[in-house]
Image: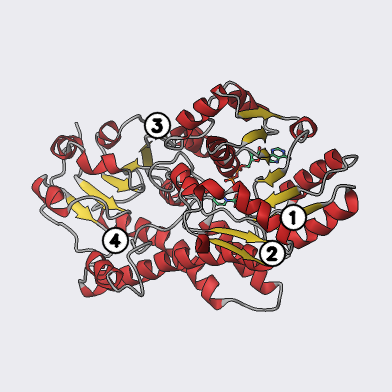
Amino acid sequence: MEVTVIGCGYVGLVTATCLASIGHTVRGVENDPRKLRLLQECHCPIFEPGLQELMSEQCGSGQLRFTSDIKSSLEDAQVIFLAVGTPPRPDGMVEMCYLDAAAKELADALGGRTADGSLTIIVKSTVPPGTSRRLNEVFRQRTQSELHVVDNPEFLREGSAVKDFLEPDRIIIGGDNPEAFRIMRRLYDPIIKREENFLAMNWESAELTKYAANTMLAARISFMNEMSILCDSYGADIEDIRKGIGTDFRIGPWFLRAGCGYGGSCFPKDVAALEHISRSVAHESLFVQAIQTINRNQKRRFYDKLVAKLGRPIEGAQIAVWGLAFKADTDDIRESPAIDIIGYLLSAGAHVRATDPKAMDNMKQVFHDSIQWVVDPVSAAVGADAVALLTDWPQYSTLPFRKIAATMNRPIIVDGRNCLHRDIMRENGFQYYPLGRPAVESKVRVRSKT
Ligand SMILES: NC(=O)c1ccc[n+]([C@@H]2O[C@H](COP(=O)([O-])OP(=O)(O)OC[C@H]3O[C@@H](n4cnc5c(N)ncnc54)[C@H](O)[C@@H]3O)[C@@H](O)[C@H]2O)c1
């Protein structure tokens, strides 16, 4: 099919590339000139495993092209994705200006077109209930084409986005038109493994499903973070509890890891949005508020633990930060707990030396030269009074810990992701503080500063 994707960020670019890889002809529309230049030169502007390779193949074969000109991208289009950002406003409400602007540009570009009735506009962005129904009305009034709007929320995870898109658990389509459902079924045919995984429903159900999924996942994390407080107080181990409840098939093992808080471009904004969505129908969602409060507190709790275990005043302390991305395998720092935690450290007068395999350039836009940037965790730790581990990059668990301990001022690690091995920490002489797990404590060796 002929596909246009408007907005080539994380979701739009993965959607465009993956749809090209399953045989569709795809035109990506991007209005950020810097990104567009990279895309047109076939350079992937984000770090996402496997995406650059797939993009190169599809650009090379001509299945995938990029432009800033909506009108030209629509010439033969049968389906058009809207995949622009819907970021949070400061009060948590969903900022709809990018989607509304893109929809207006699209309606203007479609203005004169008289289509054969098979034009489908797909809202891929995460939007509050009622949005797709409203857009359906707007497009019908503003264009002469006979077209249908469907909502098609995206469930990919950054870090495994290509695989998630090509092997989805389910595909959800919200709409009211059987022909539009049939077109969507055809579009996704090569990746639908089982018929029951293609779920058609009304617009509002599809839109709310996305918020429900992310809020449920965030709730699981916040619940485990809440339990980790009890573990610290009662001497229990949150990892044992995770296994103990995760093996119950009614609960399952996913999203049960305690840590220094969830982040990313989706959970914080979608949970905050659900609070507003509830409020706009006069429902005060205490549940959703609690998820957010626990997450906020957890970042502070990590910082308080670090301060408590430091053995010296935080003011003037040298802290190495390992990991800036909101999770491993991405360069995305949006709402990363590292932003808040580094902020607390700097406000208290600590000196921060930070590193991340992929996210440093992005984080430099936030902290500029108020912190020191180093390329690897070993150099970050030299002379440090403590390490704050904030992202679960797998390579952090196999570092040369003996060498690191020898170069630190105090061999202290506070593990905000519970991802290091306690035995290795003990063997290498660290004071090791995970969250909700028993600490490894031995006599602290303080190197005298010369
Ligand atoms: N990032 C994720 O993991 C993820 C997962 C599922 C759903 N979502 C949802 O998908 C949507 C997009 O998220 P994202 O992370 O890809 O955002 P993003 O900010 O990375 O990408 C949006 C892109 O759209 C471009 N854009 C904006 N207006 C445009 C216009 N009028 N014409 C052409 N291009 C335009 C921007 O320049 C940007 O490149 C959001 O609603 C988000 O909530 C994101």
Q: Is residue 1 above or below residue 206?
A: above
Q: Mark 3 = which residue?
A: 373
Relative image position of residue 250 (x, y in whole percent)? 36, 75
Q: Is residue 146 above or below residue 198?
A: above
Which callout, 4 or 1, points at the residue further toward the start of the chain?
Answer: 1
- The amino acid marked with disc number 1 is Val
- The amino acid marked with disc number 2 is Trp
Which tag is nearer the camera, tag 1 or tag 3?
1
Q: Residue at x 65, y 46 (%)?
A: 83
Image position of 74 (left or right of 204): right
Tell me: is circle 4 under 8 Å from ligand 1. Answer: no
The 10 Å Cα crowd at callout 3, few under 14, some 14 to 19, many 20 or more, is many
Which callout, 4 or 3, points at the residue further toward the start of the chain?
Answer: 3
Q: Mark 2 = which residue?
A: 203
Which tag is nearer the camera, tag 3 or tag 2?
2
What is the CA distance from the residue labelled 2 to the residue labelled 4? 41 Å
Q: Residue at x 78, y 30 (%)?
A: 72
Q: Residue at x 36, y 62 (%)?
A: 254
Q: Which mark is residue 435?
A: 4
Q: Is residue 389 above or below residue 395?
A: below
Contact? badges 4 and 3 (CB < 8 Å): no
Q: Mark 1 = which residue?
A: 149
